Image (spheres, grey):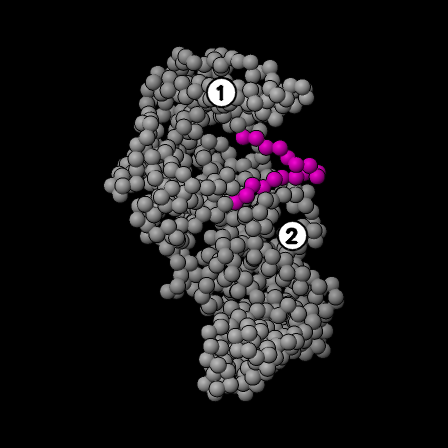
Amino acid sequence: MQSNTHSDTHSDIQANLEAFVQSAINTLVVDGKLEAQAKDSAVQIERAKDATHGDFACNIAMQLAGKLRLKPRDIATLLVDNMQQAQSAQAPWLDSVTIAGPGFINFTLSLARYNTLIQQVLATGQQFGTVMSNAHSQKILLEFVSANPTGPLHVGHGRGAAYGATLANILRAAGHRVDKEYYVNDAGRQMDILATSVYLRYLQRCDIAVDFPINAYQASYVNHIADGVYTKYGKDLVVDIAFNQLPISDYTAFVDEQQTTKYSLAACEARLTADDKAQIPVLKSTLDALKQQSEQHLDALIHCLKTQLGEKNYGHFFDAALTAIRDDIEADLREFGVTFDHWYSEKTLHASGKIEKAINQLQANGHLYEQNGALWFASSAFGDDKDRVIQRENGLYTYFAADIAYHHEKMQRNYDLAIDILGADHHGYTARVRAALLALGHDADRLRVDLVQFAVLYKDGKKMQMSTRSGQYVTLRDLRDLIGSAAARYFYVIRKPQQHMDFDLDLAVKNNKDNPLYYVQYAHARICRVLDKARPEQPNLSIKTATKQIDQLTNEYEQNLLRELEKYASVLGLAAKDFAPHYLTNYLKDLATALHSYYDAGNIKFLQADPLQASRLALLDATRQVLSNGLQLCGVDAPEVM
């Protein structure tokens, strides 16, 4: 990431120190004090872990020791002597350069830099830490959530939504142009199952008895959509549908009658005695066959419904379902603070012929073949673990065919980078899509796929169960009603997305330091309370004058705060570089800890006779601003009173 245009970032300081050390190496090589190969080693500067050792450290002497056949400390002595002589001219912002241990080089920066830091925080406000768009900025397409419009968003979608929205904010803060996109899967079998489910509920609403398939959509929202169709059309859309009886079989003898356990082999095993365990393979085979039979039954229902209703009337149910669910999803996300620049319809890929065009290009490039009546993509030739079907024997395209066309179209929109944020159940998806892009002649490195692990909810110390087919699951709206949108947004991003997440609902509503969000927000509110009290006592407070004495704030708590504030811009840069919003939440926790320690130690005192009172207020105000900026990027408010 590029330099922060509003402040000297940690990265800037590191880069300057690396250049300073490299200059010393080059000078020593020219003077014949070090061999020429010394210039080949990359200089790395790290922030010192122990503040007593300075601000930054470098281990270049250890790196060069073996190569130059010299003791590390002897090399460090040469380098430090050279840098001390050049310090006033090349690095006036340095206070000292010293040697520690076997040959570490420690750098202590001048405290005067903190005057500039606090001035810049207060002068730039909400823009502090951000990077203006420049020649190195990228145009990024960020696709996330993209849940099927077949039901309300659940808590798993919520984690992807929070991660994607926060990442977009961070990338924009780092100077990139980011477009957020939701891919609407409004074509295919799942939508037909939903439309058929609505129709069957509509028949029941018309007092027509039908058996509702277990593999149709069960939740109450299906009834609500059906009620809407009935209100608009009455019984005008009723037709006589065959195939409305579930297949009857022996599997009911093994499976619990509860909807949530049907088709569960584990539930069947629990009913068998130890002597009957040998039946498990047979039972599994039977259940698999019955599931397949039920799916075929549902497909027959869909076909029959389309045939007897006709395209127009079938469309009433399809469109009613799609509109209701998509509107609900959009409203749910908007209330969650998540919006999109584009809503991309899968149906447009079919209607525009883009799927056929992409498939034809793969065919022309020689990457398709026919086998057993199906059309296959030779994706294994491009790194996938196996070839993939893109057109079935019945002539229908697979979901993957639409994915190929969609990503082909993404590349044609000339984004520097396309990011897909998907659920962890898409493991293996990356390889096949990259293979398609390569086969179509694109640079596959322009695609990044991030998999977000599911969040498991706990309440009262117990795991909350969730299932989707039966309609019994915790929605994102349920979660927001329980703990609030702010807590949900923040808790979702405090862990890296690749980690499984145990979401403690009880912790999320606690008003104490154990709650990560409360801890950070309370730090902000504490400062606001102090500033509100102090400002009337300092009517002539001049921030410009106050920030000239920041370098005189030398107690350990003030120094800790200043060091943390100095890290903010670099944390944003690293979070953008690594696509890691949790870097920011970790930082906010550290900054809040520094503030609470300062406050709890009784260091915030306001005596009229104290010449540094204004400087301390400026430090607090800068801390408040950075806390506010960071929370805003996370999609969370920074309350002034708690």
Amino acid type indicated by mark 2: Pro
Residue 434 is situated, as x and y percent measured from the top left of the image, at 39, 46
Membership of 462 in magenta stretch? yes
Residue 599 is situated, as x and y percent measured from the top left of the image, at 71, 64
Q: Nearer the viewer, residue 409 or 390?
A: 390
Identify which residue is drawn at 48% across, 59% down.
577
* Label 2: how many Cα within 10 Å (few below 14, some 14–19, many 20+): many
Residue 131 is situated, as x and y percent measured from the top left of the image, at 46, 64
Q: Is residue 533 above or below residue 232?
A: below
Q: Is residue 224 above or below residue 593?
A: above
Question: Residues in magenta?
Answer: 452-468
Q: Nearer the viewer, mark 1 or mark 2?
A: 1
Helix, strand or loop under label 2: helix
Q: Left of 592 or right of it: where is 328? A: left
Helix, strand or loop under label 1: helix
Report which quarter residue 472 is drawn in: top right
- Decide if residue 368 is in sight here: yes
Residue for badge 2: 516
Q: Earlier in the sequence, mark 1 or mark 2?
A: 1
Q: Nearer the viewer, residue 315 or 418?
A: 418
Report which quarter residue 111 is drawn in: bottom right
Q: Left of 58 or right of it: where is 197? A: left
Residue 46 is situated, as x and y percent measured from the top left of the image, at 57, 69
Q: Residue furthest left?
A: 364
Between the residue at mark 1 and the residue at mark 2, the CA separation in whole angstroms equals 49 Å
Residue for badge 1: 289
Identify which residue is drawn at 48% across, 35% down.
328
